[in-house]
Image (tube, rainbow, N blue to C red):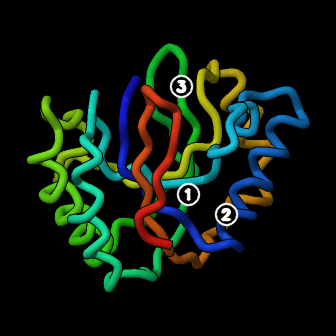
């Protein structure tokens, strides 16, 4: 199971994303609300790999002076072809891209295999996932259902965690 380093949102932004999760689930559409885990929460994956060693925690904790970081939650975004992922774009400001690059650089010595290519600087699309495994018809319905909930949201990244997908545990490093 994949391991990841994730940015955490402020309470109001977290609640706004959860509101969309509820709206999708209430209409029978795929939603991250259906992920049954005590650690399930809106987040922005920064680095993902087959394994990230816990020794990275001390290095990443040193980045706490960079938080909170203002961000904008932007337009809906769709990934994939057959089964699609619906997300909200996190607008890529210079400060967010700098933070991503620094986190990625800190993680490299602690990933026995390289991080997944879509996480590399220049290839990363910051986003908050709303739901996975949508069909094209479901994406159209989801966009209708969430139409009033898709305006830009002024937000802040207030924390950082490491997710261990094998043990299914999180370690909050900042926040």
Label 1 vs 3, first from the N-terminus: 1
Q: How many marks?
A: 3
Q: Residue at x 54, y 17 (%)?
A: 83
* Nearer to the camera, 9 or 19: 9
**Disc ID at residue 75:** 1
Secondary structure, mark 2, is helix
Q: Quadrant of residue 129?
A: top right
In this rendering, the label closer to the viewer, 1 or 2? 2
The CA distance from mark 1 to mark 3 is 16 Å
**Percent position of residue 14, x then y:** 67, 63
Seen in the picture, residue 96 relative to 54 is either above or below; the reply is below
Query: In the rendered structure, are the residues bearing label 1 and label 2 in contact, judged by CB atoms less than 8 Å apart?
Result: no
**Pointer 3: what residue?**
84
**Residue shown at the point (53%, 51%) measured from the top left:** 128
Under circle 1, the secondary element is strand
For label 3, the SS is strand
Q: Can you say whether 114 is above or below 125 in the image?
A: above
């Amino acid at each position: 199971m994949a391991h990841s380093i994730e940015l955490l949102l402020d309470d109001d932004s977290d609640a706004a994303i959860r509101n969309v999760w509820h709206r999708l689930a209430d209409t029978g559409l795929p939603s991250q609300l259906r992920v049954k885990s005590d650690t399930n929460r809106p987040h922005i994956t920064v680095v993902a790999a087959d394994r990230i060693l816990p020794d990275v925690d001390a290095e990443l904790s040193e980045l706490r002076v960079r938080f909170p970081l203002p961000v904008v939650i932007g337009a809906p975004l769709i990934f994939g072809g057959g089964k699609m992922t619906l997300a909200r774009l996190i607008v890529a400001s210079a400060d967010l891209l700098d933070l991503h690059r620094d986190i990625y650089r800190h993680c490299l010595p602690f990933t026995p295999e390289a991080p997944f290519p879509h996480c590399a600087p220049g290839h990363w699309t910051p986003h908050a996932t709303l739901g996975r495994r949508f069909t094209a018809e479901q994406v159209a319905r989801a966009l209708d259902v969430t139409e009033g909930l898709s305006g830009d949201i002024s937000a802040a990244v207030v924390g950082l965690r490491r997710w261990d997908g094998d043990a299914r545990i999180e370690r909050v490093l900042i926040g």
